[in-house]
Image (cartoon, rainbow, N blue to C red):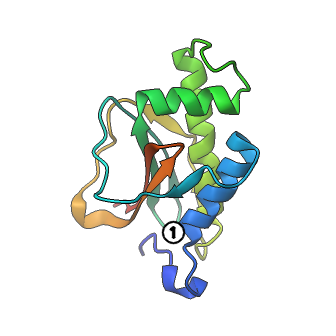
Amino acid sequence: MTFDVDIDAFQGTDPVYTIAEEVFSAMIDGEVGHLRAWAGPEPTLTDEVHAWVDVRGPVQGRVLLSTEQPTARRITRALLAMEPEEPVGDADLADALGEVANVVGGNLKALVTDPGALTLPEVSHDRPETTPEDLIYALSLDWRGRPLVITLWNLP
């Protein structure tokens, strides 16, 4: 069985984008409009930070959010209502980015028949191991001019 979300079943709307937009407007920005589809060539991330949750059960999958360190710090400041230049510690960054991955993953899990349970979120500078043939879906986003990539993966 695979972790499979039928994007076409949503009548022209992308449920991954819709979920991400709702999460960012509710949890981070307080308003709609700061998260958009990425325009142009796929972004190349540097100084990366990754947050992910896995779905375990009859369906095995991973929801992976990837961005750059400065963007992860801005997301952390926004989510934790910190001042714009306030220093962000590693623990706060892991908590904030992990929470975003958890909420996005939980909402996506709800779209899968008999999905199982989510793992606790993990956050790392090292991208978790995946193989290209297990990529289900990728969505590149622009949050306040910075790249954020959400990918869905089948897990063995």
113 lies above or below 103 = below
Figure quadrant of residue 60: bottom left
Q: Secondary structure at mark 1?
A: loop
Answer with left or right where residue 98 lies relative to residue 153.
Answer: right
Q: Would residue 148 be seen by someone viewing this image from the given angle?
A: yes
Residue located 23% across and 60% down the image: 132
Left or right: 71 as drawn, with respect to 26 = left
At label 1, which amino acid type do we have? Pro
Q: Position of residue 50 (x, y in %)?
A: 42, 38
Q: Quick one: label 1, few (<14), some, or many (20+) residues within 10 Å?
A: some
> Residue 63, can we see it?
no
Residue in the foreground of this view, choosing between 71 and 124: 71
Q: Quadrant of the N terminus?
A: bottom left
Tell me: 48 left or right of 29: left
Q: Is residue 69 shown above or below 107?
A: above
Q: Which residue is mark 1?
A: 58
| Residue 112 rendering spot, x and y as whole percentages | 58, 73
Residue visible at 50% across and 75% down in the picture: 5
- The location of residue 134, given as percent across then percent down, is 30, 64
Placement of 84 over or under 26, stated as above or below? above
Q: Quadrant of residue 17?
A: bottom right
Q: Please tell me which residue is depicted at 68% across the width and 33% down the height of the picture.
A: 79
Residue 29 drawn at (x, y percent):
70, 42
Q: Residue at x 46, y 74 (%)?
A: 4
In the rendered image, the quadrant that contains the C terminus is bottom left
Please give the count of numbered marks on the rendered protein: 1
Residue placed most toward the observer, 150 or 141:
141
